[in-house]
């Protein structure tokens, strides 16, 4: 497997290069998850660090900070869970902010016969491309937060210049024919219904035929707000299918109360 370029974020300068290469700025590990990769039982490895400042980030506590662990610790967790899962998902934070750690963890998973998925904001297209070309990644879950234009995308991510990187990631996935799930999370103030339609048109023009719509919730510590009702998001997905011509799905998590109520009424 070829080496993935890029420098890790974080310190530990007192350690030698070989020791540092075996360290992971770890945000946590969920041994068994059934919600990160639909239909797949997976171990989820959260890596710290993210260059974005999305206003409603659910994992805001993983944007920065240091909690380094030896790669052996991560490997042992994956090995212990491997009889019960079929995949490992790299998440964060932004897992591709630690390219060498991402590559090494993917390698461990592959040696155990597990598939590898990555949940990414699309900020590091070169790292993603290298991992895809090395066949380290089997499935990409890519957040597209707004139409790929500014000021819309800078408003959604808290910094300018991100939209072209996300487009590069989309194009890399289509060019290399890697399974891709594009996720758009809808909050009351953004993206608007029209902007979700624009995202759908972009995907169609790139040859991407599916879009997953998710329900945005308040992050821990922020001013509470009422999430967009599940019925509205379900109707939005139907409108995207009808008007744009791609498969759009509203996906609710188990704690979505009005979704549960809707299901009980069917």
Image: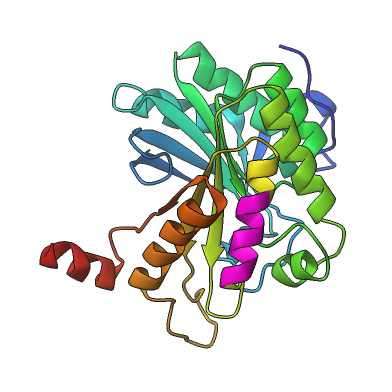
Q: Residue furthest left?
A: 265
Query: In which quarter of the view is residue 195 placed?
Result: bottom right
Magenta-tinted stretch: 193-201
Query: In which quarter of the view is residue 80 placed?
Result: top left
Image quarter (top left, top right, bottom left or bottom right) of the C terminus: bottom left
Coordinates of residue 69 in the picture (x, y in percent) = 60, 39
Q: Which residue lies at the image location 60% right of the left edge and 30% below the top edge?
A: 71
Image quarter (top left, top right, bottom left or bottom right) of the N terminus: top right
Q: Is residue 188 visible?
A: yes
Coordinates of residue 73 in the picture (x, y in percent) = 52, 32
Counting labels gives 0
Q: How is the image coloured?
A: rainbow
Q: Nearer the viewer, residue 107 or 217?
A: 217
Q: Is residue 158 visible?
A: no
Coordinates of residue 136 in the picture (x, y in percent) = 63, 20
Instruction: Judge whether 208 appears above or below 110 on screen.
Output: below
Please say whether residue 200 is one of the residues in the magenta stretch: yes
Query: In which quarter of the view is residue 3 placed?
Result: top right
Instruction: Judge whether 4 appears above or below 40 on screen.
Output: above
Q: Nearer the viewer, residue 83 or 231?
A: 231
Q: Which residue lies at the image location 55% right of the left edge and 20% below the top edge?
A: 108
Chief secondary structure of the magenta portion: helix
Q: Residue furthest front?
A: 243
Please say whether residue 5 is one of the residues in the magenta stretch: no
Instruction: Judge whether 101 appears above or below 146 on screen.
Output: above
Coordinates of residue 113 in the picture (x, y in percent) = 44, 13
Q: Which residue lies at the image location 71% right of the left edge and 55% below the top edge?
A: 50
Q: Which residue lies at the image location 68% right of the left edge and 29% below the top edge?
A: 174
Drawn side of residue 148 relative to residue 135, left or right: right
């Amino acid at each position: 497997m070829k080496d993935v370029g890029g420098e890790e974020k974080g310190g530990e300068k007192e350690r030698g290069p070989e020791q540092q290469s075996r360290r992971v700025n770890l945000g946590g590990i969920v041994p068994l998850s059934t919600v990160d990769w639909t239909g797949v039982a997976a171990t989820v490895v959260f890596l710290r660090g993210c260059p974005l400042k999305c206003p409603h980030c659910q994992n805001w506590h993983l944007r920065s900070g240091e909690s380094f662990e030896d790669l052996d610790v991560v490997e042992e967790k994956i090995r212990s869970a491997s009889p019960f899962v079929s995949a490992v998902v790299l998440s964060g934070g932004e897992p591709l902010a630690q390219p060498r750690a991402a590559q090494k963890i993917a390698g461990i998973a592959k040696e155990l016969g597990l598939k590898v998925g990555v949940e990414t904001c699309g900020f590091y297209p070169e790292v993603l491309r290298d991992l895809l070309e090395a066949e380290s990644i089997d499935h990409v879950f890519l957040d597209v937060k707004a139409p790929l234009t500014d000021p819309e995308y800078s408003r959604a991510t808290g910094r300018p210049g991100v939209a072209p990187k996300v487009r590069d990631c989309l194009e890399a996935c289509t060019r290399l024919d890697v399974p891709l799930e594009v996720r758009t999370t809808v909050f009351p103030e953004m993206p608007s219904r029209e902007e979700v339609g624009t995202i759908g048109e972009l995907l169609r023009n790139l040859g991407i035929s599916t879009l997953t719509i998710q329900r945005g919730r308040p992050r821990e510590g922020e001013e509470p707000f009422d999430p967009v009702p599940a019925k509205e998001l379900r109707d939005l997905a139907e409108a995207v299918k009808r008007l744009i011509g791609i498969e759009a799905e509203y996906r609710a998590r188990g704690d979505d109360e009005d979704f549960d109520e809707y299901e009980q009424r069917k």
